[in-house]
Amino acid sequence: MALERARQSLKRMRSAVLQAAMTGRLVPHSDEDAASILDQISVERRSAWQAETNKPYREPAKPATFPLSVPKHWRIASLEAITERYAKPLIRKWLTCGDALQRSSSA
């Protein structure tokens, strides 16, 4: 009986946490709005690109459009737009590290 009540309480708690997360009430919000944060990331990204290469800057991918309503203080962005570097160099680095780890563990 007590175990069943605990399970029901846990189910309600999970539901409440999910609801709070989806409505933007789970964590405190910054005074800075999402659009200005994304703009700042874009400026830093362009600056890092220009410091590292002579190639023309390539704008990051735009986020996919899909019918989803989000809280007014949220913004949807592509992963490429909010990461410092492109995925290919990171994946290459991870694969290289993984290969090195496999070689050292088999030695």
Image: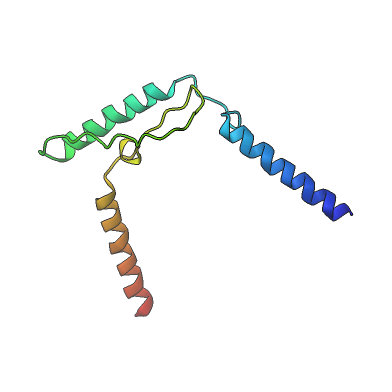
Q: Is residue 21 left or right of residue 45?
A: right
Task: Estimate the x, y position of residue 15 in percent, counting from the top left.
Answer: 67, 40
Task: Estimate the x, y position of residue 83 in percent, counting from the top left.
Answer: 33, 40
The image shows residue 104, relative to residue 18, as above or below, that is below
**Residue 50 quadrant:** top left
Q: Is residue 69 left or right of residue 99?
A: right
**Residue 76 quadrant:** top left
Q: Is residue 24 left or right of residue 46?
A: right
Q: Which residue is located at x 37 percent, y 21 percent?
A: 36
Q: Is residue 2 left or right of residue 25?
A: right
Kindly give the residue lying farthest to the front in the view shown: 67
How is the model colour-coded?
rainbow
Q: Which residue is located at x 56 percent, y 29 percent?
A: 24
Kindly give the residue lying farthest to the bottom in the view shown: 107
Task: Estimate the x, y position of residue 29 in percent, counting from the top left.
Answer: 53, 25
Q: Which residue is located at x 36 percent, y 79 percent?
A: 106
